[in-house]
Image (cartoon, grey):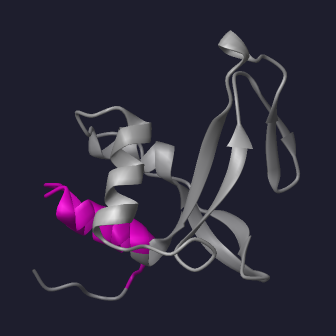
Amino acid sequence: MNELISLQPQPINGTPTETVSARELHAFLEVGRDFSTWIKDRISKYEFVENTDYITLPKTGELENKGFLTVSKNLENGGRSIEYYITLDMAKELAMVEHYENFVVLSVQFDPTPIFI
């Protein structure tokens, strides 16, 4: 099993909120599709709302932490990518729809209340 995903406080709708990196979740769940296609599809299909369920920040190449903003020093191919920080509820829902076999372990990390499957 992969390492557990770190919680990261991010401002969502002006309120400090515990989030996780959607990229880390994608890797943790071992999703077979590329990240960008996967996250955009899931946001659309399950009607997640920006600034309610997730926020986006620019991200490219090598990361340099600038507070809440993650910036790059290395622009590979001059491209820019987006970092998605998602709420714990969104992360749990994505884990469920991916039929993640260790969903209970992931859920306990995010919320120590019992979960019945």
Front-most of 6 and 47? 47
The image position of residue 30, as x and y in percent, is 27, 38
Q: Is residue 42 above or below residue 28?
A: below
Front-most of 78 and 52? 78
Residue at 62% in and 43% down: 82
Residue at 69% in and 22% down: 61
Find the magenta span and give its range: 90-112
The reply to whether the magenta stretch includes residue 45 is no
Q: Main secondary structure of the magenta part?
A: helix
Q: Is residue 83 above or below residue 109?
A: above
Front-most of 10 and 78? 78
Which quadrant, please, contains the C terminus? bottom left
Q: How many marks?
A: 0
The image position of residue 90, as x and y in percent, is 41, 71
The image position of residue 58, as x and y in percent, is 73, 43
Q: Is residue 79 above or below residue 26?
A: above
Q: Is residue 37 above or below residue 50?
A: above
Residue farthest to the top, as pictured: 77
Residue at 75% in and 18% down: 75
Residue farthest to the right, as pictured: 66
Quarter of the image for residue 80 reads: top right
The image position of residue 19, as x and y in percent, is 58, 66
Name the side, left or right, on which 87 lies relative to 79: left
Which quadrant, please, contains the N terminus? top left
Front-most of 110 and 68? 68
The reply to whether the magenta stretch includes residue 110 is yes
